């Protein structure tokens, strides 16, 4: 404990809190903190009859999303972080942040949160300690991670932990920094209150720092959901899947089988919706845990059609951030179930009516497009019974995906692990209205890790290639695209629960039970290989969904070449070989 105590002393000397409070993970302490946050107005109590244990929080107007331009990886050499990250030297990083942290907690309490990413005591879990001056952060961390005395016990006298320091400071975007020091196992975040910037166990530890540690220790920290699919005979197989944002990752993780397939008796078990830590076990297979214990999900668009399980999950013990507050102290967002409320208080605290417009004539939204809920995994009706198992779950298939109006077919399988790494490394998605910039622009997002890989992505690709060599039973790697459209822009595939039809083919491939045809880009199902019982698509839709246009793919290869070129000599030659081989097959 000496190491921990000394560090806390040093950080307190810099931040100057009025007092220090240790978070023990107890219900009693949580209640006290809730009371305090209620009286300061940091949170608002929601209608306890309709939403028991639920609270509401409003953030600063310019503090509503991850700020990637203020996020840095601080390493001795710039080369370590590669072209995909903002870099600062540790000396400069500490100095810049220190200037903001200095005295930032004056008059405030510093909370000490010992937390475990992964089940407490599992050899695959990692421990962190977050110091923060925000009760909102404490209450969110209590949902998202395993917190308290059991973690300290596990840490023991001088166990290794990630040193996480956070202060709201002035919540000033001009004095905001999210800094990672992987060489020191340290994270410093200041000037923000937004989840992705301040719940330091999530993106900062479980992806950026963990990806760096994972390379050293030969495992993978990935931006992936984990779901189990129970087949009619009771056997459960697990899939890990990576998608860029706005592709429905959370919805897929807890989908409800569609009627036709339900009759067959499928059932889905949710292990995680955002992060997977995966390592090779003694059986030569890849095993995964979800390091988190909660969901931090996007509210808008969540309803009984898109995600019925999540609608049930967020009825209790949930923290809502930046949604619309209704007169009866329940919550609403664009794309929620039911009628649009006649009035409410919007995410900025202003009186709101539907159809209201701003000075530019744009419709004012009730909820911020990135408004969120923080909710415990155990609330979820499809929560897997294996979430607390120290060993995790064996992964049969890895699925990469993106949002592509054309080009990528509904599903294809890579030829082997190396080709699968190429498929993941060349992942891309088209921007939607939810993102800044032009709609429909193709953005490369390898393995959906572009904003989260804590080191040079070229080295990350090499690590993926090496992981394949260490497995005697590697998962098969697939690519899916739920978003292909007709030339008129209509979606060809219904998505949501129906996606299980594609996952069925994927698992059947893993078990050598389904046929496929070999194409230049990989193995594809024929239309009759996808079970369409109870689902009627327009004529030829499936054929269009599975069509490959070589000319389009050759154009895509030019974009891939451009993307790969930025890594210069660092890019593994195997990926250039895959690139050349694909070009040859297409020509
Ligand atoms: C998230 C993200 O919040 O990827 O999960 O931004
Ligand atoms: Mn995510």
Image: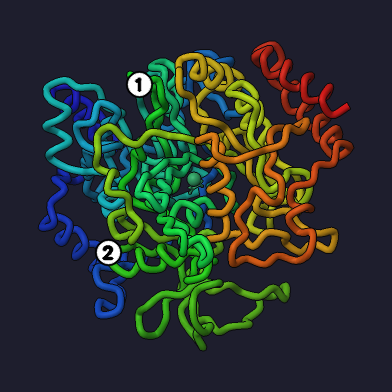
Q: Residue at x 62, y 43 (%)?
A: 401
In the image, 196: left or right of 16?
right
Name the residue tied to disc 1.
Answer: 283
Local crowd size for mark 2, using a 10 Å CA cut-off: few (<14), some (14–19), many (≥20): some
Label 1 C-beta lies within 8 Å of the nearest ligand 2 atom: no
For the residues carrying marks 2 and 1, which lies nearer the camera in this image? 1
The percent coordinates of residue 488 (x first, y second) are 84, 63
Q: Residue furthest bottom?
A: 342
Front in this rendered view, residue 360 or 495: 495
| Above or below, comparing residue 252 to residue 277 in the picture | below
Q: Is residue 20 visible?
A: no
Circle on res. 317: 2
The percent coordinates of residue 213 (x first, y second) are 40, 21
Q: State if disc 1 and disc 2 touch (CB < 8 Å).
A: no
Q: Residue at x 21, y 43 (%)?
A: 147
Q: Is residue 249 visible?
A: yes
Q: Secondary structure at mark 2?
A: loop
Label 2 C-beta lies within 8 Å of the nearest ligand 1 atom: no
The percent coordinates of residue 72 (x first, y second) are 51, 31
| Above or below, comparing residue 444 to residue 56 in the picture | above
Q: Which quadrant holds the N terminus? A: top left
Circle on res. 344: none
| Quarter location, residue 472 | top left
The percent coordinates of residue 129 (x first, y second) are 25, 35
Disc nearer the start of the sequence (2/1): 1
In the image, 264: left or right of 439?
left
| Quarter location, residue 58 | bottom left
How was this image coloured? rainbow
| Above or below, comparing residue 542 to residue 259 in the picture | above
Separation of disc 2 and disc 1 at Cα? 39 Å
Q: Secondary structure at mark 1?
A: loop
Front in this rendered view, residue 65 or 48: 48
């Amino acid at each position: 404990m000496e190491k921990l105590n000394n560090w806390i002393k040093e950080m307190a000397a810099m931040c100057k809190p009025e007092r220090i409070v240790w978070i023990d993970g107890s219900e009693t302490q949580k209640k006290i903190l809730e009371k305090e946050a209620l009286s300061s107005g940091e949170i608002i109590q929601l209608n306890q009859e309709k939403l028991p244990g639920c609270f509401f929080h409003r953030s600063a107007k310019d503090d509503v999303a991850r700020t990637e331009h203020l996020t840095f990886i601080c390493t001795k050499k710039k080369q370590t972080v590669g072209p995909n990250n903002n870099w600062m030297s540790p000396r400069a990083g500490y100095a810049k942040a220190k200037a903001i942290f200095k005295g930032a907690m004056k008059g405030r309490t510093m909370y000490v949160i010992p937390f475990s990413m992964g089940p407490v005591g599992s050899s695959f879990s990692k421990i962190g300690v977050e110091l923060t001056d925000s009760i909102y952060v404490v209450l969110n961390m209590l949902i998202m991670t395993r917190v308290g005395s059991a973690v300290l016990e596990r840490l023991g006298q001088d166990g290794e932990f990630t040193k996480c320091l956070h202060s709201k400071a002035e919540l000033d975007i001009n004095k905001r920094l999210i800094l990672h020091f992987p060489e020191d196992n340290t994270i410093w975040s200041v000037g923000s209150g937004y989840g992705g910037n301040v719940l330091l166990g999530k993106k900062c530890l479980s992806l950026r720092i963990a990806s760096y540690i994972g390379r050293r220790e030969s495992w993978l920290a990935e931006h992936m959901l984990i779901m189990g699919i129970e087949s009619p005979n009771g056997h459960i197989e697990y899939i890990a899947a990576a998608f860029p944002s706005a592709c429905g990752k959370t919805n897929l993780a807890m989908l409800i089988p569609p009627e036709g397939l339900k009759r067959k008796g499928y059932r889905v078990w949710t292990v995680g919706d955002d992060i997977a830590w995966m390592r090779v076990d003694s059986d030569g297979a890849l095993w995964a845990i979800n390091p988190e214990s909660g969901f931090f999900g996007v509210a808008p668009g969540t309803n009984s059609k898109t995600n019925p399980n999540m609608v049930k999950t967020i009825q209790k013990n949930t923290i809502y951030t930046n949604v619309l507050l209704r007169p009866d102290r329940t919550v609403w967002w664009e794309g929620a179930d039911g009628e649009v409320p006649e009035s409410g208080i919007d995410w900025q605290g202003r009186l709101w009516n539907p159809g209201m417009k701003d000075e530019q004539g744009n419709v004012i939204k009730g909820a911020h497009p990135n408004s969120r809920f923080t909710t415990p995994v155990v609330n979820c009706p499809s929560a897997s019974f294996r979430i607390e198992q120290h060993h995790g779950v064996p992964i049969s298939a890895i699925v990469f995906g993106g949002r592509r109006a054309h080009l990528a077919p509904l599903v294809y399988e890579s030829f082997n692990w190396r080709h699968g790494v190429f498929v993941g490394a060349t992942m891309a998605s088209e921007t939607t209205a939810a993102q800044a910039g032009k709609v429909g622009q193709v953005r490369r997002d390898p393995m959906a890790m572009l904003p989260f890989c804590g080191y040079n992505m070229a080295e990350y690709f090499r690590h993926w290639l090496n992981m394949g060599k260490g497995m005697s039973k590697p998962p098969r790697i697939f690519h899916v695209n739920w978003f292909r459209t007709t030339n008129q822009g209509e979606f060809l595939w219904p998505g949501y629960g129906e996606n299980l039809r594609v996952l069925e083919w994927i698992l059947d491939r893993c078990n050598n039970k389904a046929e496929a045809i070999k194409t230049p880009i990989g193995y594809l199902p024929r239309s009759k290989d996808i079970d369409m019982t109870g689902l009627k698509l327009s004529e030829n839709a499936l054929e269009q969904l599975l069509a490959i246009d070589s000319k389009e793919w050759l154009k895509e290869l030019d974009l891939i070449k451009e993307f790969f070129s930025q890594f210069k000599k660092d890019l593994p030659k195997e990926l250039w070989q895959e690139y050349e081989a694909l070009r040859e097959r297409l020509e």
